[in-house]
Image: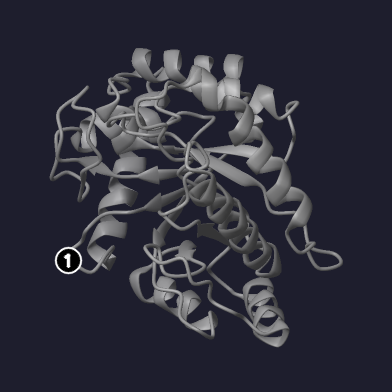
Amino acid sequence: MNIGAHVRGGGKLIPSLEAGVQIGATSIQIFTQSPRAWKPSQYAPEVLESFRAALAEHPSVTSTFCHATYLINLASANEELYEKSVLCLTHNLSVARGMASSGLILHVGSHLGAGFEPVVAQIADGFARALRDADSAPAGVADCPILIENAAGTGGTVGRSLDEIEALIDATGNDERIGLCIDTQHLWASGVDFSSVAGTKKLVKEINDRIGMDRLKCLHLNDSKIELGGNRDRHANIDEGTIGTAGLAPLVGHTKIRNLPLLLEVPGDGDGPRAVDVAAAEKVVAAGLKLYAKK
């Protein structure tokens, strides 16, 4: 199993690897800049090179994911905000490529009531521009995909369902550099019940049919403070929410899911994932494996 966690990045980046080690994580996720500010963090080429070398040689942390800034809104009707969003996404992708990240995870944004269909083309264009204009991945480093994160369904958020994400990928011409990150809390809040083996199998089939399991690069493994179908983004520590170990186990134990990086985005005691949260996630995966071992 590969249990990861969101950790702090910092100016030199390499300490984020050690932050993962301290809590027992085997993958990490960081913000490439402040999540709630437009000003980009500037990393010298030697800082990115040092991080790549440290990651490649690391004995326990196998992969790094980056999370794009929350302010990005590719669905905005405000031209200035849209342009700032595309530029910010482009910079975030440049850093992620420079870090040899396994994916840049993105909240696409909100159409603020304008409707989904009218914003599909501009979102696809934003993806295309960022993929074209971002700094190239260093020689010998695999390209970093943009991973669309499913939304919890609040207001006009884009990506609240797999059919919306499918439409966005279709609009890019099925660009192979666009992938998927599934957040378990968001999925639960949007009304998808994966808490049984049958429910998980239905979900996995839909992901494969609509998007392709090969595009699913990681999960955000979170419990939920909100009930099934509550349409709000409220993460809880594992087994302290409405999903619980029993509800998460069928999903993470599935043969198509169990070996993916499972990234914790839980509150911990207020400062993010802890060693105890990683241990709780490991128990969830173990419970899931037992479910499928019985079949």
At x 32% / y 20%, what residue is drawn?
A: 192
Q: Identify the image's colour scheme: rainbow, by chain, secondary structure or one colour.
A: one colour
| For residue 115, above or below residue 5 | above
Q: Which residue is mark 1?
A: 270
The answer to which of 161 and 255 lies nearer the viewer is 161
At x 21% / y 43%, what residue is drawn?
A: 234
- Circle 1 packing at 10 Å, graded few (<14), some (14-19), many (20+), is few
| For residue 201, above or below residue 46 | above
Question: Hey, which quadrant is residue 59 in on the image?
Answer: bottom right
The answer to which of 109 and 148 lies nearer the viewer is 109
Q: Position of residue 57 (x, y in %)?
A: 67, 76
At x 49% / y 50%, what residue is drawn?
A: 81
Question: In terms of secondary structure, where does tag 1 sit?
Answer: loop
The answer to which of 74 and 152 lies nearer the viewer is 74
Q: Seen from this angle, which residue lies furthest front? A: 79
Question: Hey, which quadrant is residue 35 in on the image?
Answer: bottom left
Q: Position of residue 178 (x, y in %)?
A: 66, 38
Left/right of residue 145 with respect to residue 285 in the rendered view: right
Task: Please state which amino acid type lies under the numbered disc 1.
Answer: Gly
Left/right of residue 129 with respect to residue 210 in the rendered view: right
Q: Position of residue 247 (x, y in %)?
A: 24, 29
The answer to which of 76 and 172 lies nearer the viewer is 76
| For residue 48, above or below residue 202 | below
Does residue 204 show up? no
Does residue 260 show up? yes
Q: Seen from this angle, which residue lies furthest right? A: 139
Q: How many marks?
A: 1
Q: Position of residue 173 (x, y in %)?
A: 75, 26
User: Dividing the image into 4 quarters, which one contains the C terminus?
Assistant: top left
At x 76% / y 64%, what residue is drawn?
A: 135
